[in-house]
Amino acid sequence: MLWLCILLPPLEPAALHNLALWALQWSSQVSDGHDGSDGGAAALWLEIGASRQLFGGADTLRARIAVELAALGYSARLGIAPTPQGAALLARAGHTENATTLTALLTLLQPLPLGCLALAPEQQAALRSTGLGSIGELLALPAAALARRFGPGTSHTLRQLCGQAPEPLRMLRVPPQFSSRCEFSFALTDATALLFPLQRLLAGLQGYLRSLDRAVQRYTLRLEHRQCAATCLEIGLARPTREAALLLTLARERLAALALAAPVQALGLAAREFLQPLVLQMDCFSQSVQHSEQLQTTIDRLVARLGAGAVQTLGLAADHRPERAWTALTAQQHTAVSAAPATTMPARGVPPLRPCWLLPEPRGIEAPQELLAGPERIESGWWDGADIARDYYLARGAAGAHWWVYRDLRSGAWHLHGLWA
Amino acid sequence: MMRPAEQRAAVLAQLDQACRRVRADGRSGARADEYARPAARATGFSELDALLPGGGWPAGAITELMPEAQGIGELSLVLPALAQLCGAGQHVAWIAPPFLPYPPALLRHGIALGQLLWIQTLDARTALWAAEQALRCPAIGAVLAWPAGVDERRLRRLQLAAESSGSCGLLYRPQSCAQQHSPAALRLLLRAGAAGLHIDIHKARGGRTHAVVVHPAAAA
């Protein structure tokens, strides 16, 4: 067993829990709690004996964890030792050296002052009154004398420190669904101020997903207010991912477009459905793979800011009525489904000539001065009540523009329906 | 599907060709960025290509198209290039177009509809933002936009976005903008003529200006 201890300034239980989820990516055995010392520091223990080789050794793993913690804005101290107590003690003492064996741990402990021990204040006072200087001197005393003089608690702690007594830790059970939350000491009025706490929550999600080797395609942000109901934002992606940076980018677009209903008291993050991540071969020559990745990312960003219906692809529909001869599909649906080409030429013959622009609604106009081509009669739709009977013409409009106009065969009124742009 | 060995051979051949081109350009003193990406995409109209520096729509840059009126063939002018891009697997983004790009007509112009992205925005500001995002994406070969109320600084942002990805930014603007200073690589004034579309090259970076060509109108 080899333990890495992360000591943090006092934290909310929810924040510590989120960090514990984050830490799952390094080890399947994570425990969160307090280091037992006077200051009430929050502590995480990770069993890295099994996983350190995966991450390039204890030194590399330690450096990597330190960098990521700093990126999340935590000032943490780390220690590595064969016992949880030992790792916490080395972290508290600010030791940069790792103790990978018990012997190494004892050597490192010898010169440390007694104040480094995680003991209650009265036990600390009792130790100080003896005139002992260092942990080494304390450990040199016979065990029986120690127990008699300072009580069984201190003696037991020392035995755990040196690996002579077991130290059971309460291990984090990996929850089947991800849920994390963070409360603010003062209400946030600006949606962009949520990004920093969100970054931490997403780091938790990323660690959790990495540990399970899963990815998410949607997640929920819950903005809690004091007076009114919480604002829930569903954030969807075109493809499953577990990259916190990408998830954050999408959330940023959504938050930028959001007008807060009320100040935000707490922020929650939840993800329930997990998928297999799409593992892509990172082949630098397969440009198309990279392109499709980049396209997904761009579409996701646009959708996050503009809404799911704002980014669409176009297709044909089998209907003679011009306003119904086309369809739109949201791009996220499209790219998620698109194995088959979205649209091909209609099976029968050459499609009729049509203008590049169609007006969203036909616009009533005066009878055109000059008709250049036509008519093309379109009568259709008697079956659904939206039937039309029109004669379409190519007409000359202002400044030499070419208009697609029709005369309604029933009312005789003229309409502009398209532009030959 | 190519087999890995074939794929590797094809890539090596491409690299070899690229190296040769670099060496040749080095001797002739060409600038380093000139072979980094295609400088232009053919418009599909040889009369026009002949007059444009690079022989087509500038890639990695902004082109401004300023038609006198809507419906004179201003869209048909770019459709051959768009069809070509789509055929090469690139995407084309339409940012908040004034009307519906009508799928039956686009298909007739040879455009693969599945490659189009039709992006609708609520206001001009988000449209500009969306245009910039689309221009930054290397998978999107061309971005069509109808910016309103843009100043030179905003245009420059779009120009930089296009430079970063090598995409063609095609901006439709009213002719009243012609007097405004612009960082666009190419600016065209368009009007309908008896024989087709009159194109007045208002500005062409690294090329001639004030040339006029005629292109058969698409409406015929």
Image (cartoon, rainbow, N blue to C red):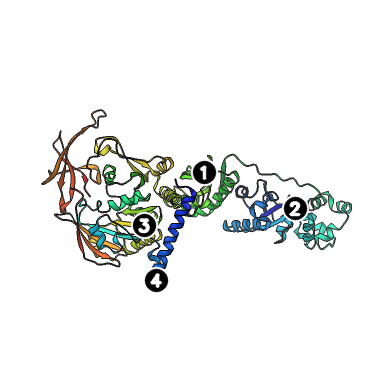
Q: Is residue A289 above or below residue A275?
A: below
Residue A186 seen in the figure: no
Label 4, residues with CA under 10 Å away: few <14, some 14-19, many ≥20: few
N-terminal label among 4 and 3? 4
N-terminal label among 1 and 2? 2
Q: Is residue A312 above or below residue B28?
A: above
Marks 1 and 4 sit apart, C-alpha to C-alpha, by 53 Å
In front: A140, or B175?
B175
In front: A392, or A188?
A392
Query: Which residue is denoted by mark 3 in the rendering?
Result: B167
* Total count of labels: 4
Query: Which residue is denoted by mark 1 in the rendering?
Result: A216
Mark 1 vs mark 4, foreground winner is 4
Marks 4 and 3 sit apart, C-alpha to C-alpha, by 28 Å
Query: Which residue is denoted by mark 4 in the rendering?
Result: B27
Marks 3 and 1 sit apart, C-alpha to C-alpha, by 31 Å
Label 3, residues with CA under 10 Å away: few <14, some 14-19, many ≥20: many
Tags 1 and 2 touching, CB below 8 Å: no
Marks 4 and 2 sit apart, C-alpha to C-alpha, by 65 Å
Considering the numbered disc 2 on the image, is that residue within a helix, a strand or a loop? loop
Residue A56 image offset from top left, x and y in percent: 65, 55
In front: B39, or A411?
B39
Query: Which residue is denoted by mark 2 in the rendering?
Result: A82
Tags 4 and 3 touching, CB below 8 Å: no
Marks 2 and 3 sit apart, C-alpha to C-alpha, by 57 Å
Mark 4 vs mark 2, foreground winner is 4
Considering the numbered disc 4 on the image, is that residue within a helix, a strand or a loop? helix
Residue A210 image offset from top left, x and y in percent: 58, 47
Q: Residue B197, labelled with which disc?
A: none
